[in-house]
Image: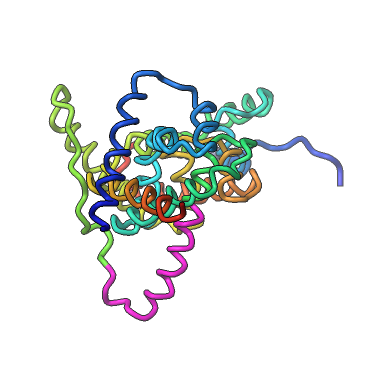
């Protein structure tokens, strides 16, 4: 079989998805992927929806540690140490 | 007797911390002093990460009590083993690794127990979800949509298979790098990427009706 130039289709796009979103692709690959994305509705939607999900994940509200828990843990550590002495 | 111990401990807990608070020390300095057995520095060091670990555990195990236990065990282990921390990785990578190990062990134990008592399971999506503080400056419809999406994301996150969930949490919620995640979970970077990919696609599938694009 002859060596062919990679065809940048949806499958290849998916393969590079993580690196694409991390923006850590070599520019020559990135440019090829962008060329595909610009003509592909599916890959455009995929990227947009994943960006939205990642954004929402990053802005999830944090749970507060119950007030007494931290004090209890710190006290527990101290007592352990105290006992070891 | 125990009461007396506790009081002593409480006194020593509060005082030094307040005295030191005014001078910000670099983390390496805190680590050095914590290793020397100076507890107030250990406390300062971990106070930066307690909430993070709690949230990571909470989201990984979907349960408050388990999250409390993971936090407790993680801090105790960190306290016991800080002298062995060789500073080849960052402190939080080391701490997260302890936390994830504790959490994974808990998960394994729990899945064994669940085989016996499966009626006890909570129905996903019906747990108490902490209320968000809405941004009043925004249009109420948008606030509502956003709230619904956040709710759905929490629920979907609970359903992501654990192998992928740990990676998604560390990457997309905590914002760690692939390399750091690989260290924490003892995986290769390509394995991290592959799990991340699957986890994200899982979330997208679950949320496709809500995300209007
Ligand atoms: Zn495509």
Name the residue at 59% across, 42% down: B85
Ligand 1, image quadrant it occupies: top right
Q: In this view, does B158 lie to the left or right of B141?
A: right
Count of number-bearing discs: 0
Residue A79 at least partly seen: yes
The image shows residue B107, relative to residue B169, as above or below, that is below
The image shows residue B147, relative to residue B161, as above or below, that is above
Q: Is residue A27 left or right of residue A71?
A: right
Q: In this view, does B85 lie to the left or right of A81?
A: right
Image quadrant holding the N terminus of chain B, namely bottom left
Q: In this view, does B64 lie to the left or right of A39?
A: left
Determine which quarter of the picture holds residue A4: top right
Name the residue at 54% across, 43% down: B82
Q: x, y percentage for residue A1? A: 86, 47
Q: x, y percentage for residue B70? A: 39, 54
Name the residue at 55% across, 31% down: B32
Name the residue at 50% across, 50% down: B80
Q: x, y percentage for residue B146? A: 24, 36
Task: Pick the residue in front: B38 or A53.
Answer: B38
Task: Pick the residue in front: A61 or B32.
Answer: B32
Determine which quarter of the picture holds residue A53: top left
Magenta region includes residue A84: no
Magenta segment: B100-121
Task: Pick the residue in front: A25 or A46.
Answer: A25
């Amino acid at each position: 079989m002859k060596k062919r130039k990679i065809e940048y289709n949806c499958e290849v796009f998916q393969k590079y998805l993580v690196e694409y979103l991390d923006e850590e692709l070599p520019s020559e690959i990135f440019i090829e992927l962008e060329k595909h994305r610009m003509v592909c509705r599916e890959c455009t939607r995929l990227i947009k929806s994943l960006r939205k999900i990642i954004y929402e994940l990053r802005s999830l509200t944090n749970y507060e540690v119950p007030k007494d828990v931290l004090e209890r843990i710190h006290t527990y550590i101290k007592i352990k140490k105290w006992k070891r002495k | 007797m125990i009461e007396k111990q506790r009081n002593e401990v409480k006194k020593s807990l509060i005082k030094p911390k307040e005295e030191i608070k005014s001078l910000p020390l670099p983390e390496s300095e805190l680590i050095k002093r914590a290793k020397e057995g100076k507890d107030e520095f250990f406390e300062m060091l971990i106070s930066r990460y307690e909430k993070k670990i709690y949230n990571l555990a909470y989201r990984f195990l979907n349960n408050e009590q388990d999250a409390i236990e993971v936090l407790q065990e993680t801090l105790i282990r960190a306290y016991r083993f800080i002298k062995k921390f060789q500073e080849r990785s960052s402190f939080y990578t080391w701490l997260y690794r302890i936390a994830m190990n504790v959490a994974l062990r808990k998960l394994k134990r729990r899945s064994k127990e669940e085989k016996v008592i499966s009626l006890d399971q909570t129905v996903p999506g019906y747990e108490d979800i902490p209320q968000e503080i809405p941004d009043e400056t925004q249009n109420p419809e948008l606030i509502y949509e956003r709230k619904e999406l956040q709710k759905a994301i929490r629920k979907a996150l609970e359903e992501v298979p654990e192998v992928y969930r740990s990676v998604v949490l560390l990457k997309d919620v905590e914002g760690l790098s692939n390399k750091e995640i690989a260290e924490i979970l003892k995986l290769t970077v390509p394995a991290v990427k592959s799990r991340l990919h699957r986890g994200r696609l899982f979330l997208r599938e679950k949320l496709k009706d809500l995300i209007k694009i």
